[in-house]
Image (cartoon, rainbow, N blue to C red):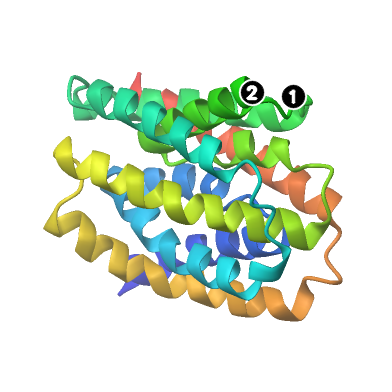
Amino acid sequence: MTAFLLTNSIVVLGALLQAVTGLGAGLIVVPLLAMVNLQLVPGPMIFASLALSTVMAYRGRADIAYANVPLLLAGVVLGTVAAAAMLTRLPPEDLGLVFGGFILAAVAISIRSPSIPQVPAGMLGAGTLSGFMGTSAGIGAPVLALLYQHQSGPTIRATLALLYLFSSVVMLLALHLAGRFGDAEFRSGLLLMPGFLLGYLVSLRIVRHVDKGYARTAVVVISTLSALVLIWRSL
């Protein structure tokens, strides 16, 4: 029961940030869950996050920007296949280094926030990088978020939710084929779902009042520290 409450408290925090800002769940949840139990990422966390993505995409369906979604998802498939092939060759004890490294990379991308060209090659490349990082470490959101950083809040949240939903299904299939998502990971994911749903429900009361600048700063700081701890523990 203690582990259930601890892990879901972590998930509530990440889900709350994602429901308010459009991203943040992976950056917060993955490193903290990995510190509690490395077996909870990436598969169980990705599976549990489907609950949040589904609700956000459905409720915000009128605000979704569909134009580049097919190209982005094609890239996600390519990146996911590459990451799944890598995971089959990586010893479990080295996953902490991989997760920590990808988390730091995701944080760096979030801080720099470069402008990604809205052209087919840019969309395909962004999707590929997101799929690779998402499958390897459960964190592909920052890459996709950068594409929509100049859109309105509702469009960012709804479009990213749709992309997370479809890309998560692809990632889970790849992880299953790589032997990293089976019955045990499925059950662990079910236990994390309440946290994602509770975080979303709480966000409905505060989404208009939260300062997104502070939320983003909190994500960056906590993620960086957690990633460094993960890397230190794996050395």
Determine the residue positioned at 52% across, 47% down. Answer: 26
Residue 179: image location, x then y, percent: 13, 39
For residue 77, which quarter of the picture? top left
For the question of whether residue 9 can be seen, the reply is: no
Which quadrant of the figure contains the N terminus?
A: bottom left
Residue 46 vs 88, above or below: the answer is: below
Q: Position of residue 129 (x, y in %)?
A: 51, 26
Residue 70 vs residue 107, the one in the foreground: 70
Q: Nearer the viewer, residue 125 or 187?
A: 125
Residue located at (83% from left, 65% from top): 210
In the foreground, 47 or 70: 70
**Label 1 SS:** loop
**Mark 2 vs 1: CB contact within 8 A:** yes
Give the labeled residue for mark 2.
122
Instruction: Estimate the x, y position of residue 78 in percent, counting from the top left.
Output: 38, 27
Q: Nearer the viewer, residue 216 or 150?
A: 150
- Specify the amino acid type for callout 1: Pro
Dot 2 surroundings within 10 Å: few (below 14), some, or many (20 or more)? some
Direction from residue 146 to residue 142 in the image, left or right: left
Task: Choose the circle earlier in sequence order: 2 or 1.
Answer: 1
Residue named by callout 1: 117
Asked if residue 218 can be seen in this view, the reply is yes
Q: Is residue 224 placed above or below 3 in the rendered structure? A: above
Q: Quadrant of the C terminus?
A: top left
Q: Is residue 145 left or right of residue 211?
A: left
Quadrant of residue 60 within the rendered picture:
bottom right
Task: Give the residue displayed 65% in from the left and 78% down from the top.
Answer: 202
